[in-house]
Image (spheres, helix red, strand yellow):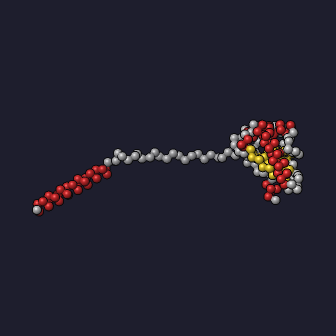
Amino acid sequence: MIKGRVSLSRRAALAAGCGLLGLAARAETPDQALPPDPAPAPPPPVQLTPLRPQTPQATPRPLQGLQTLPQGGFRLRMTGADLTPAQTAGIQALARELAALPQGRITVEAQVAGPADDVSAARRLSLARAQAVKSALVAGGLTPTRIDLRPLGRLSGAQDAVDILPPGVASPNAEARRS
């Protein structure tokens, strides 16, 4: 019996030793099932300066019926809801310049001088003016989806005017809208 135990322990020791040798051999050779090391990271992207929207600069000839605002943009004086032929031609010339800009939205802000007692009528008249200017801008080649309308109604300044603001130009009516 002792002899049987010894041979059994020798067998167990031999099997354990072979198993350890197999593990050691595997540890020394790379496993074929593992994926290769990843490629080195690419260099960081070049930092580009963002494009600033360009507002149309002074044109060689003045745009008919449009007044240039000091902070940028253009003002159009209107007494009714319809444009004169000179105003339409000036707006269409401006639209061709604005259509050449790569991106950005154009804002049309319309206001009226009266009636002071009927807020709804003032808002409707300013909307009609803004829509007339938008139609002229579209006829000049500007995409309609780039145009935002802001019918302001009657403001504290009480002016009959429509402002065309290129991308990046702040509203000259911001203070008047707060009051």
Image coordinates for residue 15, horizontal then vertical, percent: 21, 55
> Above or below — where is 5 with respect to 133?
below
Give x and y (percent) for residue 164: 79, 45
Q: How many marks?
A: 0
> Considering the image in quadrants, where does the C terminus appear?
bottom right
Q: State the residue at coordinates (74%, 39%).
A: 142
In the rendered image, residue 64, in percent from the top left (x then y), is placed at 85, 39
Q: Position of residue 13 (x, y in %)?
A: 20, 57
Residue 94 makes an appearance in the image: no
The residue positioned farthest toward the bottom in the image shown:
2
Q: Which quarter of the picture shows residue 133? A: top right
Give the quarter of the image for residue 136. top right
Identify which residue is drawn at 74% across, 44% down: 147
For residue 175, above or below residue 52: below
Is residue 103 shown left or right of residue 108?
A: left
Residue 85 appears anywhere in the view: yes
Which quadrant of the rendered structure holds the N terminus? bottom left
Residue 94, quarter of picture: top right
- At a point 77% along the width and 42% down the height, the residue shown is 56
Front position in the image: 179 or 123: 123
Residue at image location 17% in from the left, 59% down from the top: 9
